[in-house]
Image (cartoon, rainbow, N blue to C red):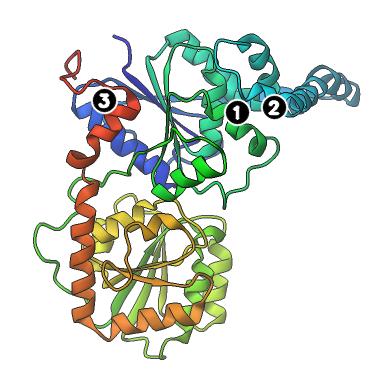
Amino acid sequence: MADDLWIVLPHLGPGGAQKVAMLAAAHFTELGYRITVVSLLPDKAPVHVVPPGVRLIDLGDAVTAARRGDWWNRSLQARGRRFLGLWLPRLASWFLLLTLWPWLRHWRPPTGAALLRWLMRGVGGPQAALLRERVLAERPPRLLALLTKTNLLACQACWDLPIHLAVSERNDPRLQTLGFPWQRLRRLLYTRADALTANTRGVLETLGTDLGLTHARLLPNPLPPGIAWAGERPPQLQSPVICLTVARLVRQKGLDVLLAAMALLPRRPTEWRLVIVGDGPERQALEEQSRALGLAGSVRFDGFQSHVLPYLEQAGLFVLPSRFEGMPNALLEAMAAGLAVIVTDASPGPLELVEHDHTGLVVPVENPSALAEAIGSLLQDPRRCVRLGAAARHRLASQEWKEIEPMWRWALNLPAASPPHDG
């Protein structure tokens, strides 16, 4: 039988969007729907496991083959022909799209669909083309894309097709700069989405005020099953206290600021440990910074972990010193588990959940001294940690599936009644 929903991702490597996609796929599969996950990028080692009963379409090898066909030619003459035959038309299509954008952005499918599809063919490259081929071959009735670039590729692939298309914007467009020509094309391509969604109200506001996309609606991140504590969380503040962060090791997450803050704490290493769960391109630099600051014996890098609940159970507090954010799953899980949390004021997403000194602590971004002061204050006050953690857990009750499923059903155009077939 035909699928009910396709979920399109750039890859199955580390990332909050990937985790949300797997949670949604598992949830709706358990309800009896047929779900397919589509992965677009090659050369990304998967760390997320596709749930049982969910089909995976991995286009990575096909994208690699297409890229090799574009670039790796055996002679300069062949490369010259390739440029004239492929890249010159691609550059021309970029130029025409950006030149005609003030008029094209007012078009709606199917008006001008053939011309617009031809112009966009060179922009999206093999990912959009291969996705379109699979969509044309199987005709899924619904498609959900997550993350900006994947959203735009899905809009291209489905531009003139009768498919319910939902896209999920997961970072604030004011703080996220896309490469050429995507920054200019985002507003045009998002007009194709039947359901334009964001996981924070701050991103919704930006989509409306900066991009004029006032039809966007909220689609909250779900919580993993079993992450929330049923009763009061016991304080985990016996020495050494575990200060936990769960994040991709990229500059966005501000982990260099966190290490600088930990170096400012009183040098009593038996009283605390910093555990960093996650991996990424900044790992070597962060490990070197840790050693240079004299923290090597107090900081542990545990890499990516598919199951973070054991870390949450052992931690005393959670720190996320990001330079910008959407709505990080790690923060949701820490709050649902009853941990006292510390975030920065850089982005509106976390601030929708973390009210200073009520559901957590908020510190200025890029300020190691303020971050160190906040961490030190919690290390010295177990009762405050328990109070903040309890309020955080209560706040996160609104993120459970039973609360947010109606929003997801709207976005995916899934009927509220029983699905049309069994699992």
Horizontally, residue 104 falls left or right of residue 342, namely right
The residue type indicated by label 3 comes to: Gly
Horizontally, residue 138 falls left or right of residue 101, namely left
- The residue closer to the viewer here, 79 or 109, is 109
Give residue 67's position: percent from left, percent from top: 68, 27
Marks 2/3: CA distance?
Answer: 42 Å
Q: Considering the image in quadrants, where does the C terminus appear?
A: top left
Q: Are marks 1 and 2 in contact (CB under 8 Å)?
A: yes
Q: What element carries label 2?
A: helix
The residue type indicated by label 2 comes to: Trp
- The residue closer to the viewer here, 261 or 312, is 261
Q: Residue 101 carries which label?
A: 2
Structural crowding at the residue carrying mark 1, measured as other residues with C-alpha within 10 Å and reported as few (<14), some (14–19) or many (≥20): many
The residue type indicated by label 1 comes to: Leu
**Residue drawn at 30 percent across, 80 percent down:** 378
Give residue 99's position: percent from left, percent from top: 77, 27
Residue 51 seen from this side:
no
**Residue drawn at 53 percent across, 70 percent down:** 256
Marks 1/2: CA distance?
Answer: 8 Å
Q: Is mark 3 on a helix, strand or loop?
A: loop
- Who comes first in sequence, dot 1 or dot 2? 2
**Residue drawn at 28 percent across, 9 percent down:** 1
Q: Which mark is residue 188?
A: 1
- Who comes first in sequence, dot 2 or dot 3? 3
| Mark 3 vs mark 1: in front | 1
Question: What residue is pinned by disc 3?
Answer: 53
Structural crowding at the residue carrying mark 2, measured as other residues with C-alpha within 10 Å and reported as few (<14), some (14–19) or many (≥20): some
